[in-house]
């Protein structure tokens, strides 16, 4: 399923869109609310461990983190997720992320809680990043994160 297929028939109402995306996620992956998700470290622990990692460097270290999606850029290629300890950037690209994981990207909204397993790197601009290998949905935001009242 590509992004156009996933979102072509979605409603124009934000709440309906979220419900439709949740239905699509259930059709695609089944259990969208797994009972357990185990991360290997918090975002702050990750930042502390790799604070001396030079820009434009990729490690071979595989980590698992989780957090709420606070921003998404370039159709989900870049996402910032926050946990109670801080922020980490997630990178999902055809060169680093398997297609089955990338098909979830159009269905992930701001406010959703996701888990990511991937390789740690620092971008040319110095941003600590995880190259996503797997994406797990943990909680889907069914109401808008932005108040309209």
Image (cartoon, rainbow, N blue to C red):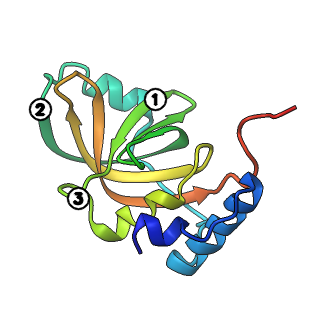
Disc 2 crowd rating (10 Å Cα; few below 14, some 14-19, many 20+) is: few
State which mark lies toward you, 2 or 3. 3
Q: Earlier in the sequence, mark 2 or mark 3?
A: 2
Disc 1 crowd rating (10 Å Cα; few below 14, some 14-19, many 20+) is: many
Q: What secondary structure is marked by label 1?
A: strand
Residue to which mark 3 is pinned: 94
Residue 36: x %, y % from top left: 56, 62
Q: Up-down: is 148 above or below 107?
A: above
Give the quadrant of residue 54.
Answer: top left
Q: Earlier in the sequence, mark 1 or mark 2?
A: 2
Residue 19: x %, y % from top left: 71, 64
The number of numbered discs placed on residues in the rendered structure image is 3
Q: Earlier in the sequence, mark 1 or mark 3?
A: 1
Residue 143: x %, y % from top left: 76, 49
Q: What secondary structure is marked by label 2?
A: strand
Residue to which mark 2 is pinned: 57
- Residue depicted at 51% across the width and 76% down the height: 29
Using residue 145 as the reference point, say whether residue 122 is left or right of it: left
- Residue depicted at 13% across the width and 38% down the height: 58
Q: Are marks 2 and 3 in contact (CB under 8 Å)?
A: no
Q: Nearer the viewer, residue 141 or 3?
A: 3
Residue to which mark 1 is pinned: 87
Q: CA distance from mark 1 to mark 2?
A: 19 Å
Q: Nearer the viewer, residue 18 or 58?
A: 18
Q: Nearer the viewer, residue 98 or 147?
A: 147
- Residue depicted at 67% across the width and 68% down the height: 20
Disc 3 crowd rating (10 Å Cα; few below 14, some 14-19, many 20+) is: few
Q: Nearer the viewer, residue 55 or 18?
A: 18
In the rendered image, the quadrant that contains the C terminus is top right
In the rendered image, the quadrant that contains the N terminus is bottom left
Q: Up-down: is 51 above or below 36?
A: above
């Amino acid at each position: 399923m590509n992004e156009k297929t996933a979102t072509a028939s979605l409603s124009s109402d934000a709440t309906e869109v979220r419900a439709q995306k949740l239905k699509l996620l259930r059709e695609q992956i089944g259990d969208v609310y797994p009972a357990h998700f185990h991360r290997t470290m918090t975002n702050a622990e990750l930042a502390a461990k790799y604070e001396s990692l030079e820009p434009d460097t990729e490690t071979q270290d595989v980590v698992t983190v989780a957090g709420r999606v606070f921003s998404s850029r370039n159709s989900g290629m870049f996402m910032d997720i926050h946990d109670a300890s801080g922020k980490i950037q997630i990178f999902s690209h055809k060169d680093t992320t398997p297609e089955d994981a990338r098909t979830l990207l159009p269905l992930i909204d701001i406010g959703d809680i996701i888990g990511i397993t991937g390789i740690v790197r620092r971008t040319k601009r110095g941003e600590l990043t995880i190259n996503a290998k797997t994406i797990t949905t943990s909680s889907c935001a069914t109401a808008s994160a932005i108040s309209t009242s």
